[in-house]
Amino acid sequence: MSELSASEYIKEQNALEDEARELMPQSPTHCTYVDGALRQPVFACLDCGEIGVCYSCSIQCHANCDLVELFTKRGFTCDCGTERQLKKKDKSEFWCQLRQNSSRDIPSSSNTYGQNFKGRFCDCHKRYDHESDSTMIQCALGLNCNEDWYHCSCILETREDTTREANTSEPIDQLPKDFPSLESFDAFLCWKCVSRFSSIFQDLLAHTLSQKLIAHIVPHSNTLESAPSSSNAVKAEESSKKRRAETDDDLPFSIMFRPDYKDVLVMIKDDLEESSKLYVFLQDIAPFLLDEDSVYEPSEDSDDATSTFELGTQALSSSVDRSIAVAGIQAMDNIKQKLSEFLKPFADSGKIVKEEDIRNFFKLQKEEESRDS
Ligand SMILES: [Zn+2]
Ligand SMILES: [Zn+2]
Ligand SMILES: [Zn+2]
Ligand SMILES: [Zn+2]
Ligand SMILES: [Zn+2]
């Protein structure tokens, strides 16, 4: 693409706008700090004090920061513009642009800050790498690991990553060969969280309904590599006796629940004495395992929302990733007017707009911006 008319350019912008909207369907207008602790999408800001912020704040207040997407966290209160935030957005009088607070608000005392908020994940404590990372799975219990995300190979502790690098023909999303298929389970409970409640889980495994509940028990140990077994994952269909044997020794193990596990947990709970430890666990410590997921969703954009005209020079390329969409939406108000003015003479005269003209326009804007700051 070397040149295009203003109308073609606008048409192209509209297509990009649709693409950006598809990536970010919710309008970023409400900070959830006022709603308190929610299960909601959380973003870690590494620049403002390793705080977690809500979806809207990730766009309106931290778009130029080093952000890490953490997906959903349970019981989290947005920390944008609270005393946990260490620095303010440049040139702003407000700590949170959406709440418009000129002094910092009191942070929630119940937020738990694990390694994910430093941009680290899994037992290997690595940063997430979009390019090379294989499938990662979040712990559904999370009471010990703070709902951490794990590489499948780290769950098994087989360290297959190194061999994979050597063999580049292997697709990166391929699971380790002993790993259960992702369709066969719906919830993963990491070995760290299971170990913390080991006597509770022994009771759960011994329950008559455990066959209906548990899809896999996955020992976390490379000592098993020497075992004459074709699979590290012990299938639930195998006798519960064997399972007891596997879990009675001190090997830590992760548990995977079957797809309809919530209903089964409710049945198990209904069957228990209220004084039993397992009942207390299901009722008070991990009630979220039984509840239907309710994740806070920011409201959807309405059709009359402003156009994302100014995705900038990068918008001229065919792929729009999230960070560009964020930058585009954030820059929208500042630059839309200017671009329309710039394009008007071209549109009026039917003159061709060259890609170079657009690039120059954005270059000029950048120069103005850096002059201002
Ligand atoms: Zn917020
Ligand atoms: Zn920030
Ligand atoms: Zn904010
Ligand atoms: Zn890992
Ligand atoms: Zn866990």
Image: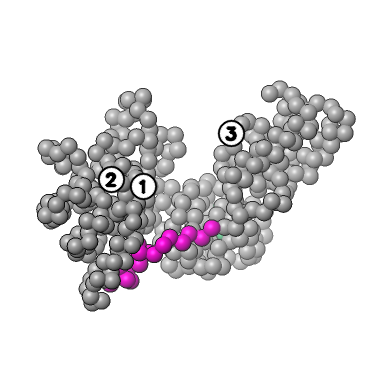
The kind of residue on which mark 2 rests is Ile
* Element under disc 3: loop
Rendering quarter of residue 27: bottom right
Quarter of the figure that contains the N terminus: top right
Q: Which residue is mark 3?
A: 319
Cα–Cα gap, marks 2 and 1: 9 Å
Point 27% across, 41% down: residue: 179
Rendered residue at 62%/45% (across/down): 21
Instruction: Locate residue 288, reporting x and y percent.
Output: 37, 64
Report ligand 1 position as a quadrant: bottom right
Question: Label 2, label 3: how many angstroms apart (C-alpha)?
Answer: 33 Å
Q: Decide which of 268, 371 is in the foreground and name it.
A: 268
User: Which residue lies at the image location 38% right of the left edge and 33% below the top edge?
Assistant: 172
Which residue matches tag 1? 137
In front of the other: 216 or 164? 216
Quarter assignment of residue 82: bottom right
248 to the left or right of 277: left
SS for callout 1: strand
228 lies left or right of 371? left
Residue 182 at x, y percent in the picture: 34, 44
N-term-proximal mark, 2 vs 3? 2
What's under tag 1, amino acid-wise? Ile
Residue drawn at 55 percent across, 63 percent down? 32
| Magenta residues (range) | 280-297
Graded by Cα atoms within 10 Å as few (under 14), some (14 to 19) or many (20 or more), the crowding at tag 3 reads few
